[in-house]
Image (cartoon, helix red, strand yellow):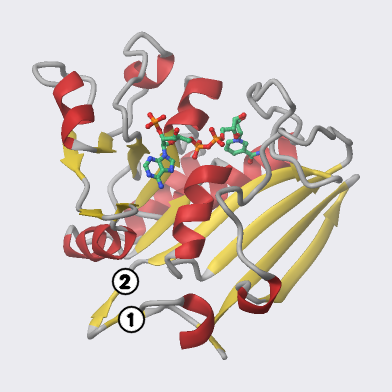
Amino acid sequence: MQEGPPDTLTQKLPLTTVILAMSADGKISDRGRSPARFGSAADQTHLEEQVSLVDAVIFGAGTLRAYGTTMSVRSPQLLAQRQVRGQSPQPVQIVCSASGDLDPKVRFFSQPVPRWLLTTAAGAQQWDGCDGFETVWVAPQRQEGMDWQEIWRSLSGFGFERVAVLGGGALAAAVFEAGLVQEFWLTVCPLVLGGAAAPTPVDGLGVLAEVAPRLRLRSLEQRGDEVFLHYGVLHDEAISGEK
Ligand SMILES: NC(=O)c1ccc[n+]([C@@H]2O[C@H](COP(=O)([O-])OP(=O)(O)OC[C@H]3O[C@@H](n4cnc5c(N)ncnc54)[C@H](OP(=O)(O)O)[C@@H]3O)[C@@H](O)[C@H]2O)c1
């Protein structure tokens, strides 16, 4: 097994990082699926730093419904570093919603960021003639749903070299299952949320332990009562599935 970006056939896919904060008992929100604001100021800074590194972020509709906003890059230093790297001021913010059922009045739609919608043909119809998104992208489909391998090939085709997945558990499950994740940042926060139905970092159907993606710890840092874990995902044909 080796760390590193997967190649699908000969095309190099974007370097993909999943970034999440969870309670000490492994929940990314409470049982009411309220916006997860339990991370400290240091965790918010960490998230902004990670977002500042990428060309696009992608998150699920449930996450947008919970927060109504997204993390943009505001630090002058991080904005300057993006300019030096030749990146646009803000990463493209891609919302994944099969239904397209999103409230156009939430603050996200007035944030100064480029907005794309990744959806189905039916979801796209909902946004026909609306200007909330600069791009409405109908996802390629497979029998079981969106074709994540193909979506990632398209992201590469759009010139995105680094992508961050900002949750929630449903979207993270889809990209892990498709073997597309190379890095995983997890902040362990000092609270216990409990709740069998409360979302976890990777939900979906889950996988059996013998085929579970394996991780290598790259760094571990304590700041106050929080722990910042940085993992690399080990890639292997048997583990990552189709690549
Ligand atoms: N602690 C953290 O770091 C963190 C980060 C993010 C979110 N959260 C929390 O997580 C919760 C939201 O998570 P969630 O479980 O609702 O997950 P989510 O992935 O944010 O949203 C799920 C929705 O996104 C769309 N979607 C996701 N994966 C899809 C796929 N494979 N194919 C098609 N559509 C897909 C669907 O939208 P449609 O329903 O429109 O079809 C689906 O219902 C909130 O409580 C939020 O506070 C916490």
Find disc 1 in the rendering and name its residue. 7
| CB contact under 8 Å: marks 1 and 2 | yes
Picture coordinates of residue 216, whole percent (x, y): 69, 78
Front residue of 27/86: it is 27
User: Which amino acid type is marked by label 1?
Assistant: Asp
Picture coordinates of residue 28, whole percent (x, y): 69, 39
Residue 72 seen in the figure: yes
User: Which amino acid type is marked by label 2?
Assistant: Leu
Find disc 2 in the rendering and name its residue. 13
Determine which quarter of the picture holds residue 161.
Answer: bottom left
Compute the Cα span from label 1 to label 2. 6 Å
Picture coordinates of residue 234, whole percent (x, y): 58, 81
Determine which quarter of the picture holds residue 98.
Answer: top left
SS at mark 2?
Answer: loop
User: For this view, does 24 lie left or right of residue 63?
Assistant: right
Residue visible at 25% across and 36% down in the picture = 116
Residue visible at 42% across and 65% down in the picture = 178
Question: Crowding near pointer 2: few (<14 within 10 Å), some, many (20+)?
Answer: many
Residue 236 seen in the figure: no
Q: Is residue 117 above or below residue 13?
A: above
Q: Residue furthest front?
A: 143
Q: Which residue lies furthest to the top in this view?
A: 105
Residue visible at 25% across and 84% down in the picture = 9
User: For this view, does 175 lie left or right of residue 84?
Assistant: right
Q: Is residue 11 above or below residue 63?
A: below
Instruction: Look at the image and tell me in which quarter the N terminus lies.
Output: bottom right
Q: Earlier in the sequence, mark 1 or mark 2?
A: 1
Picture coordinates of residue 153, whole percent (x, y): 24, 66
Question: Crowding near pointer 1: few (<14 within 10 Å), some, many (20+)?
Answer: few
Front residue of 52/32: it is 32
User: For this view, does 190 lie left or right of residue 48?
Assistant: right
Q: Is residue 125 above or below residue 204?
A: above
